[in-house]
Image (cartoon, rainbow, N blue to C red):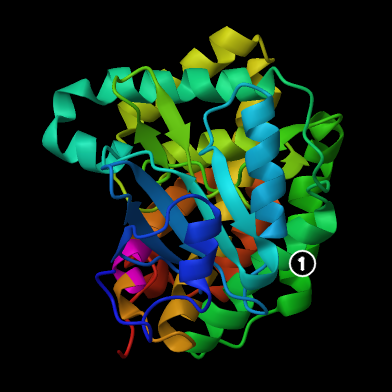
Amino acid sequence: MTLSSVDLPEGLDAFLAAAGWGGAVVEPLPGDASFRRYFRVRSVDGACAMLMDAPPPQEDTAPFLRAAHWLDDNGMRAPRILAEKPDRGLILMEDFGEARMRDYLDEWPTDEAAVYSSAIDTLVKLHQLPAGPFLNYSLAEYLRETRLFIDWYCTAQNLYVDAAGWTSAWEQALSPMLPRQRPGVTVLRDYHAENIMLLGSLERQGLLDFQDALVGHPAYDLVSLLQDARRDVSAELEAQMFDRYVQKTGVAVEPFLADYARLGAQRNAKIVGIFVRLWRRDGKPRYLDLIPRVWAAMERDLAHPALAPVAAWFAANIPAHLREANGGEYAR
């Protein structure tokens, strides 16, 4: 193997041997914002697979495996599971290769509309399925996520804000949406250009990072894709792809647009909090550079009348200079 035993997960040799991949070369891959690690595994005959190391107790592989098996059983292109050892946090899975949507579009920007159209079509296909065996995206969960903005962003900016009013404003904004997310669709919750792989063509797209799937509103993953925290999506492309989704699903435009704004604001507020947490708690300041893009999208969402209670809270609690600076500066 290419790494020392200190660097590799404990028991990896035996795991790979039992899976028929004994003697394989193991190469580390860049990490993400969690405790998970990934490796590319190359067999002696040249085949490739992906290894996830999600060590307990920090990580639990059960949600990932449940979602991966459900997606695969229902015709969606999640990586096929080749071997698993949940008690050690080891999963060997199909390797989708290197053609990530984000990286492909960096090199071939003229294909943007075609690639995003395929991503919309994948989402439509997912939403035509009965919801998977996942928990419901409840109001309590939405509110818990929005609290990240108060707990991390406001604290980092030394802001003393109306926390009770924040919760009340979100309850008022989100409650009218809840009946429209029943019976619900499978919500992957992180559906964006860094978690979509191109599998040999622009039309064949594979899914990654779906372990937090819930049953919720169809607008959630749509706004995740079109208000991407990590990649600029123009207002024109966002509108074009929103219209494509509406046309293919036949949803009523006005209530769906309102819910899209609600979930965009909710998700973007959560992400701002998470990115500040990654800096302050986990020592990853690079995520701060992404906040202006997320903040700008959140401001657009707040302009919708459906977000009036939350917009009023922002006006009363977040100083204008921070909002105008898309979140402000941070003492790194």
- x, y percentage for residue 60? 68, 67
Q: Label 1 neighbourhood size at 10 Å, few (<14), some (14-19), many (20+)?
A: some
The magenta-colored residue range is 287-291
Residue shown at 43%/44% (left/top)? 195
- x, y percentage for residue 22? 41, 58
Q: Judge left or right: residue 27 versus residue 59.
A: left
> How many marks are shown on the rendered structure?
1
Relative to 52, does residue 77 appear above or below in the rendering? above
Residue 221 appears in the rendering: yes
Residue shown at 51%/39% (left/top)? 79
Residue shown at 53%/18% (left/top)? 245
Magenta stretch mostly in which secondary structure? helix
Q: Image quadrant for the N terminus?
A: bottom left
Q: Image quadrant for the C terminus?
A: bottom left
Give the residue pinned by disc 1.
167
Q: Judge left or right: residue 132 versus residue 8.
A: right
Q: Nearer the viewer, residue 5 or 55?
A: 5
- x, y percentage for residue 239? 42, 24
- x, y percentage for residue 90? 56, 63
Residue 152 position by quadrant: bottom right
Question: Is 267 one of the magenta-colored residues?
Answer: no
- Mark 1: amino acid: Thr
Q: Nearer the viewer, residue 260 or 304?
A: 260
Relative to 120, does residue 57 appear above or below in the rendering? below
Residue shown at 16%/30% (left/top)? 109
Tell me the SS state at disc 1.
helix
Q: Nearer the viewer, residue 62 or 291?
A: 62
Question: Is 290 one of the magenta-colored residues?
Answer: yes
Q: Judge left or right: residue 257 versus residue 209.
A: right
